[in-house]
């Protein structure tokens, strides 16, 4: 399995071809993402398509579950459409086109929101979704996204929420009139904020507005003002909009993927494409900023995953960064083992929280991550709405909810 390859990790630094354990369906999906960029993937797809143990239904399911239908379809269409059963190719094409139409609609919604924010002096940075698709894929149709994620200054959060409400968006929990919408955000006695973002539903579009990237169980030191100061412009439908700088983008993607134990290939693909889009990144500066932000190990994990699965980065200096941390290497191996064993499975809540702790940079950060597991969140409020004066009771509700979720998850996998 993959540990045998990864144990000789120094060998990977200058290695251009990747050997996969035997999972032809997963390999076909991964190679398809790269097919229109690497001739060896084109040849390998032809070889894989002739294997008797390749399951075409599983290929489609892996692409859908891991939210990478657009790059998989584009790769297949560019290299070997005649090798794929017509019904599978048709299903992928249909999802690709539906996603393209939705993406364009979401771009229009995002541009309208940003225009309104700017007119009111609200600083906002879109950091995933359409901006990420344009900045790193250079193709809105090549990435799946279903919402708009915006960072704003904390002092602008209330005004941003008011603006979205005027545009017809509705806070997800506004129907609960026992508690004003601000309550779950600001927390209560002895309880930190139950969430650091607001989620708005516009009917056909969802917008998430937050003021920080920090989570109690996954610390990251990237203040909004610093991100804004380093932000760059990205063109969307002819309009220039703010976006994260290339280095900040990498750190945010590395942090986000690690928070979720890289449970979708989409997040690894995003990181690989972000690296590929900035071929001459100053890698020592990237590591330095990651270390300052408290996510150096998570950056190394992201580099290791993108290197093994998507053969990126190419530069030896970046590859060495990926293998210079034994714990990061071990965690990459565990994630890859999960993919080759079950590319359609979720790691589960307990494993994800354990990964949060293990992927931190220091003992102090590990303790913060471990204790963060017990901090109440908006999920507890949704289950048991309480007035702010009783928020401390959520310290009792949360372990019960997590226990119930783990029992349910275990039962479903039996």
Image (tube, rainbow, N blue to C red):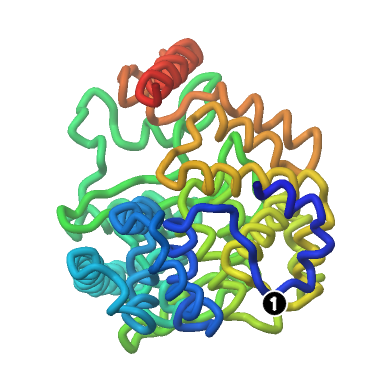
Q: Position of residue 295 (x, y in %)?
A: 71, 51
Q: Which residue is drawn at 42% across and 36% down?
A: 185
Sort mark 1 into few (<14), some (14-19) or many (20+) by Cα contacts within 10 Å.
some
Say if 341 sits above or below 188 in the image.
below
Q: Which residue is drawn at 35% across and 79% down?
A: 80
Say if 92 sits above or below 141 in the image.
above
Nearest the eye: 149 or 198 = 149
Occupied quadrant, residue 319: bottom right
Q: Where is residue 340 in the image (x, y as percent from the top left)?
A: 53, 48
Say if 401 sits above or below 272 in the image.
above
Q: Residue furthest bottom?
A: 238
Q: Where is residue 358 in the image (x, y as percent from the top left)?
A: 71, 36
Residue 118 horizontal side relative to residue 330, left or right: left
Q: Residue at x 84, y 61 (%)?
A: 10
Residue 232 horizontal side relative to residue 411, left or right: right
Q: Which residue is drawn at 61% across and 40% down?
A: 218
Report the number of discs.
1
Task: Please identify the quadrant where the C terminus is shown.
Answer: top left
Residue 146: tell me if it is visible: yes
Residue wearing tag 1: 314
Q: Is mark 1 on a helix, strand or loop?
A: loop
Q: Where is residue 70 in the image (x, y as percent from the top left)?
A: 33, 70
Residue 152: tell me if it is visible: no
Nearest the eye: 49 or 7 = 49
Say if 322 sits above or below 361 in the image.
below
Nearest the eye: 393 or 48 = 48
Occupied quadrant, residue 282: bottom right
Residue 346 horizontal side relative to residue 58, left or right: right
């Amino acid at each position: 399995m993959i540990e045998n390859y990864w144990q000789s990790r120094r060998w990977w630094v200058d290695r251009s071809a990747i050997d996969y354990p035997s999972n032809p369906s997963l390999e076909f999906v991964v190679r398809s993402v790269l097919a229109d960029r690497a001739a060896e993937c084109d040849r390998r797809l032809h070889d894989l398509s002739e294997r008797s143990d390749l399951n075409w239904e599983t290929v489609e399911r892996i692409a859908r579950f891991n939210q990478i239908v657009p790059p998989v379809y584009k790769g297949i269409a560019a290299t070997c459409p005649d090798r794929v059963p017509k019904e599978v190719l048709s299903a992928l094409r249909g999802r690709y086109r539906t996603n393209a139409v939705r993406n364009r609609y979401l771009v229009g919604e995002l541009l309208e929101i940003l225009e309104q924010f700017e007119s009111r002096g609200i600083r906002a940075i879109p950091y995933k979704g359409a901006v990420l698709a344009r900045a790193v894929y250079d193709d809105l149709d090549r990435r799946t996204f279903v919402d708009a994620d915006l960072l704003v200054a904390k002092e602008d959060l209330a005004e941003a929420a008011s603006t979205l409400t005027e545009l017809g968006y509705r806070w997800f929990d506004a129907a609960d009139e026992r508690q004003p919408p601000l309550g779950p955000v600001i927390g209560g006695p002895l309880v930190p904020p139950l969430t650091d973002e607001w989620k708005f539903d516009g009917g056909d579009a969802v917008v998430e507005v937050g003021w920080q990237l920090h989570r109690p169980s996954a610390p990251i030191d990237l203040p909004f003002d610093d991100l804004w100061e380093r932000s760059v412009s990205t063109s969307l439908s002819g309009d220039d909009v703010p976006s994260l700088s290339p280095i900040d983008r990498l750190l945010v993607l590395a942090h986000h993927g690690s928070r979720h134990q890289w449970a979708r290939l989409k997040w690894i693909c995003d990181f690989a494409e972000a690296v590929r889009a900035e071929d001459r990144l100053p890698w020592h500066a990237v590591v330095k900023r990651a270390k300052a932000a408290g996510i150096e190990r998570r950056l190394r994990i992201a580099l290791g995953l993108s290197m093994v699965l998507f053969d990126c980065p190419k530069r030896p200096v970046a590859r060495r960064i990926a293998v210079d941390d034994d714990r990061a290497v071990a965690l990459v191996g565990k994630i890859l083992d999960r993919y080759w064993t079950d590319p359609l499975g979720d790691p589960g809540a307990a494993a994800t929280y354990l990964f949060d702790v293990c992927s931190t940079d220091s003992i102090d950060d590990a303790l913060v991550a471990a204790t963060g597991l017990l901090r109440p969140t908006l999920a507890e409020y949704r289950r048991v709405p309480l007035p702010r004066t009783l928020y401390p009771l959520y310290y009792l509700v949360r372990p019960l909810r997590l226990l119930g979720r783990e029992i349910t998850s275990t039962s479903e996998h039996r």
